[in-house]
Amino acid sequence: MEEVVHAHGHENVSADHASTFEVTTDDYLTPAGDCILAIDADRAPSDFSREFVDACQDENAIITAVLETPDERVTITGRGHPDLAFENDRGHVGRTSTYVDDRTIMVDADAAAADLPRDFVAALADGAPLTMTLRVE
């Protein structure tokens, strides 16, 4: 089961955050948004199917985020949690911790923004398109 989100990078993408990564529907990014990888996403967590959300609420679920620019592909793997609500209408946040709020799309992620390859981050800072495919098993 999967959900696909399209967005694009921005000149202020720094990907310096050590415990989260985010893709947002906002059409702007300030330098303070150091976890944000891409903006202007065409979908928010609140747009995801009930079936997908239900599957992610299993604490044994494995959730992967495949992040693709035209030249590179990065995969981040985390897990589900019973409190994942997918109700936010702005941001998708993956977390290396177990903290959950309405933006959280996975917990215990094996990478955060700061862990991503710097050439991948540079492409996003140049405005590259990003496709984020979320899969749950």
Image (cartoon, helix red, strand yellow):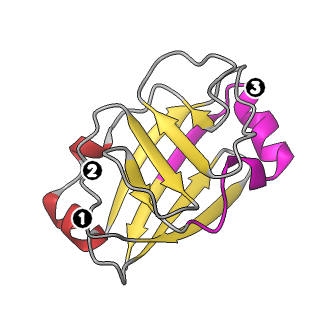
Dot 2: what SS? Answer: loop
- Residue range corresponding to the magenta coloring: 109-132
Coordinates of residue 84 in the picture (x, y in percent): 29, 59
Mark 1 closeness class: few <14, some 14–19, many ≥20 residues within 10 Å:
some
- Position of the N terminus, as image quadrant, is bottom left
Dot 2 corresponds to which residue? 86
Mark toward the viewer: 2 or 1: 2
Q: Tell me: 85 left or right of 27.
A: left
Q: Earlier in the sequence, mark 3 or mark 2?
A: 2
Q: Earlier in the sequence, mark 2 or mark 1?
A: 1
Coordinates of residue 5 in the picture (x, y in percent): 41, 44
User: Between 38 and 6, which is closer to the camera in this rendering?
Assistant: 38
| CB atoms of marks 2 and 1 within 8 Å | yes
Q: Tell me: 101 left or right of 18.
A: left
Mark 2 closeness class: few <14, some 14–19, many ≥20 residues within 10 Å:
many
Look at 63% across and 29% down and name the residue there: 9
Residue 54 sits in quarter: bottom left
Dot 3: what SS? Answer: loop
Q: Tell me: 16 left or right of 9.
A: right
Dot 1: what SS? Answer: helix
Question: Is 111 one of the magenta-colored residues?
Answer: yes
Mark 3 closeness class: few <14, some 14–19, many ≥20 residues within 10 Å:
some
Question: Is 129 one of the magenta-colored residues?
Answer: yes
Dot 3 corresponds to which residue? 126
Q: Amino acid at mark 2?
A: Phe
Residue 102 sits in quarter: top left
Q: Amino acid at mark 1?
A: Phe
User: Between 127 and 36, which is closer to the camera in this rendering?
Assistant: 36
Q: Amino acid at mark 3?
A: Asp
Dot 1 corresponds to which residue? 52
User: Between 7 and 46, which is closer to the camera in this rendering?
Assistant: 46
